Image (cartoon, grey):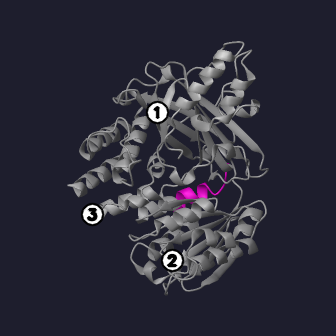
Amino acid sequence: MQGVRTMERFRTRKALLALTAASGLLLTACSGGADTGESSKAADRPEYGAGEPAPAEGQDADERDDLREDPDHLSTFALDVDTASYDYARRALAEGRLPDPSTVRPEEFVNSFRQDYDRPDGDGFSVTVDGARTDDEDWSLVRVGLATRTTERTGERPPAALTFVIDVSGSMAEPGRLDLAQKSLSVMTDRLRDDDSVALVTFSDEAETVLPMTRLDGNREVIQDAVSDLDTQDSTNLGAGVETGYETAVEGLREGATNRVVLISDALANTGDTDADSILERVSGERREHGITLFGVGVGSDYGDALMERLADKGDGHTVYVSDSDEARKVFSEQLPRNVDLTARDAKAQVAFDPETVEEFHLVGYDNRRVADEDFRDDRVDGGEVGPGHTVTALYAVRTEPGAEGHLATATVRWLDPETRDPHEETGDLETDALHDSLRAAPSRFQVTAVAAYFARALSSRDDRNHRLPGAPAGLGELADRARALSDTTEDGAVRDLARAIEQADRQRD
C-alpha cells in the first residue's frame, strides 16, 4: 500500500553499500529552499528516477542502482482537479445530514480553494513545494502545488465543440435538477462565441440526439428552443446516454476545436449498463482516437457520486457538483466557456522523499488516482487532464528523522502536450530549513489547505488507515474557529463557506 512508507530497509542497505564504496561520499541535495519550477528538469537527468539527486562525483554505481530500484521513497499519482466531493458534502450538511464517508475524497476538498502559487510564463506547470512543522513531534505537513498559466494569458482559445448529454429520467424532475440544467444551458448559450458549436443528447430509457452539432452563429434561438423543450421521462439508462453522446460528438467532430462531452446527471443509473468501466469501454475508440474528454456535472440531493467520479476519472476528464443557481452559473457561464481548452494531457506527479531525512510519509487522499511508481514515465498509463488557470494541490503528512537537516523532497510533474503528445517535466525542491516553524506561521493559503484536509478526514472514518493528521485540532469546534479566522484574513467567501460547513458538521456530530 502506497499510503505508508517506511524507509528503514532502504537506509540499512544504503549504509552497507556506502561502507564498501570506494569514495565514501554521501548523496547531497541539488538545491536549497523551496522551488517554484525554475530548477533543472528531471528530463535532463534521464539516468535517475524522478526527483532523485544526481550523485556526488565518484559515487559508487551500485549505490545509484539501489536508489533507483528501491521505490519506498516515492509517491506517484495522477493529477485531479475534481471538486464534486466537497460541493456534495456541503449540500448534505446544509440539509442537516452528514455525507456518506465513501463520498468524501480529501483531495477534492483541498482542491476546492484558491491558491497563490506562482504561474508559469508559458504552457505547462510551475511546481511549488513548501511545508510547516506541527505540534506533533517530528511531524510536518508538506504541500506540493502545481499551477498552469492563467486564462488571461491564453489569447484566443480554439473554438469549442460541446456535446451535452442530459439526463431526462424521472428523478431529474426534482427541483434543482433538470430545471437547473436548463437555466444554466440557456445562460451558457448566450456566453459562448459565434464559432463555438453545441449538440444536445438526452437519455432516459433510451438515448436520443435532439440537436446535432450546431454552430452558435445564427442558431442561438434554435439551440435555446431545444433546451427549453427538454422534459423528464422514465428510467435512467446512463450508459446509452454516454454512448450516444460520444457518437454524436464524433459525427460533429471539428478539427482544431476542443471536442468535449458534458454529462449532466444525478448519476442514479438503473437501466441498461450501470458499470462505469463497461460504459467507457464501449466508447474507448472515440476517446482515444479523437481525444474527446468527459466533463461530469452532478446534480440532485440524491446523487450517484461513485459512478460519476469513475466515469470522469477514466474518461480523461473531471467532475463538479452544483446544488443551486449560483454554483451552476459559475460552472456553465464562467468555468466551462473559459476552460474548454486543455493545457496538459495524462499529467502525473511523483514526489521523491529523501531517505536521509524522512522516516515515513502519507499522501492525503488521491486513493483512486494512485499510479505505480515505475509507470510515472510510461506515457501509455493514464494521467489527468488539466486546463489553463487550474491549480492542483497534494498534501503529505511527513515524519522526519529527529534533528534531520538537508534535502527533504523533490516533486516532479510530467505531462503530454495536448496537440503533439510530446512529454514535458518540471520539478521543485524542499529543504528542511525551509519548513515553517508552525502551521500558524505558514501562509494563510497553506493553512486553508490544512483546514480543508482536516475537515475531510473528520468526515471520513473508513478504517484504521484513517489516522489523525498531524496538527489537527481536538474537535470540529476548534477547526471551525480556525476557518473563521482564516476567512477574515483571506477575505475569501469560499473560506467563509468552509467555516459554515464545519460548524454544520459539528452540530450534526452532537
Q: Are marks 1 and 2 in contact (CB under 8 Å)?
A: no
Please name the amino acid that badge 1 sits on.
Val
Q: Which of the two labelled residues, at mark 3 and mark 2, occupies the earlier sequence position?
A: 3
The answer to whether residue 499 of the structure is visible from this angle is yes
Q: Position of residue 233 (x, y in %)?
A: 49, 87
Nearer to us: label 1 or label 2 = 1
Q: Are marks 1 and 3 in contact (CB under 8 Å)?
A: no
Q: Is residue 355 left or right of residue 18?
A: left
Q: Residues within 10 Å of mark 3 (few under 14, many from 20)?
A: few
Q: Are marks 3 and 2 in contact (CB under 8 Å)?
A: no
Label of residue 398 in the image: 1
Q: Is residue 364 left or right of residue 499?
A: right
Q: Is residue 264 above or below residue 99?
A: below
Q: Residue furthest top?
A: 23
Q: Residue drawn 50% across and 80% down?
A: 270
- Asked if the magenta segment contains residue 398, the reply would be no
Q: Position of residue 166 (x, y in %)?
A: 55, 75
Nearer to us: label 3 or label 2 = 2
Q: Is residue 129 above or below residue 302?
A: above
The residue under label 3 is 96
**Element under disc 3:** loop
Label of residue 269 in the image: 2
The residue segment tinted magenta is: 332-343
**Element under disc 2:** loop
Q: Residues within 10 Å of mark 1 (few under 14, many from 20)?
A: many
